[in-house]
Image (cartoon, rainbow, N blue to C red):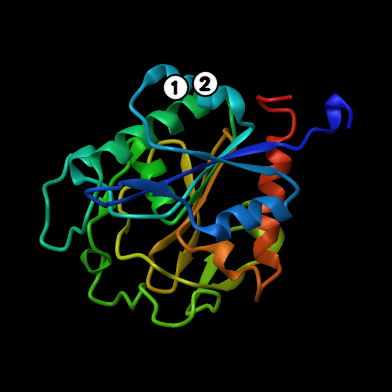
Amino acid sequence: MGENMKKRIIGLTCCEMEDIEHPSQRTNEDYITAVVKSGAVPLLLPICDDETVIEQQLECIDGLIVIGGVDINPLFYHDTYAFEQGTSSLKRDIYEMKLIRKCSEKKIPILGICRGQQIINVAFGGTLYQDNKMLSDNVFQHQQKEKKYYPIHSIQIEKDSFLYSIFGKACYVNSFHHQSIKDLAKNFNVVARSEDQIIEAIQHQFLDIWAVQFHPEMMISQDKKMQVIFNNFIKKCEGKGNV
């Protein structure tokens, strides 16, 4: 295979698994499968506080997917802990924000999913609701009990967004979150909302940074259009970084 035919390498962030004797890091297989189906190569990026390691991680990738996981420490958006705040990881927050900022500086495309959308917003100066109920008494259940690959609510999509070309003005999505964006970071646009006004997707105004609050990687088996999100993201990564 010629040099120009190399597949894009996509970095996937990891979740920490708390085990006193054997702490570990992992990512869900759904993310890996979505990247492979898009024609790219997934590369797991373990959480690390070594600046040299982070720089070399960035040298290896053409795009970054920031995955879901635990809550974000509210200190990073200048808020105090509410009773509704769940488990967080200071080390992961610091690592992912460094990774996101460095990728943006290097023009490496970024796709955030669920917590990934939230940490992108915080990394660029936005804030969060520590629980969706803080937005309104009218919010509905966003931590579904339905199987992961089935939707539970609809979202309304803005034109000229990365989702509109795939789904049109609306689609149905799954939902696994109790936190969401409050104040949107500078230079981002809201491109989708749920019926109860939760921000469901954002994109940067001039950088290749997309994010969704739902989990498209889980829905691919039931909704083929969800795979197109990843396919289109990989196209954004062509000619970036590792060539």
Asked if 160 appears above or below 139 in the picture, the reply is above
Task: Write the residue at 27% across / 37% down.
Answer: 91
Badge 2: how crowded within 10 Å, few (<14), some, or many (20+)?
Answer: few
With 33 as the anchor, is 75 left or right in this view? left
Residue type for callout 2: Gln
Query: How many C-alpha atoms fall within 10 Å of the one at disc 1: few (<14), some, or many (≥20)?
Result: few
Q: Secondary structure at mark 1?
A: helix
Q: Is residue 225 above or below residue 150?
A: above
**Residue position marked by numbered label 1 in the rendering:** 53
- Are dots 1 and 2 in contact, CB under 8 Å? yes
Label tally: 2
Q: Secondary structure at mark 2?
A: helix
Which residue is outermost to the front?
A: 21
The amino acid on which the numbered mark 1 sits, given as a three-letter code, is Val
Residue drawn at 12 percent across, 57 percent down: 82
Left or right: 75 with respect to 23? left
Image location (x, y in percent) of residue 147 = 49, 80
Residue 10 at x, y = what percent? 62, 39
At a point 57% along the width and 61% down the height, the residue shown is: 30
Q: Tell me the CA gap for discs 1 and 2.
A: 5 Å
Where residue 81 sits in the image (x, y, percent)?
12, 51
Vertical position of residue 225 compared to residue 19: above or below: below
Circle 2 residue: 56
Report whether 116 appears left or right of 226.
Answer: left
The quarter of the picture where the N terminus appears is top right
Whether residue 53 is visible here, answered yes or no, is yes
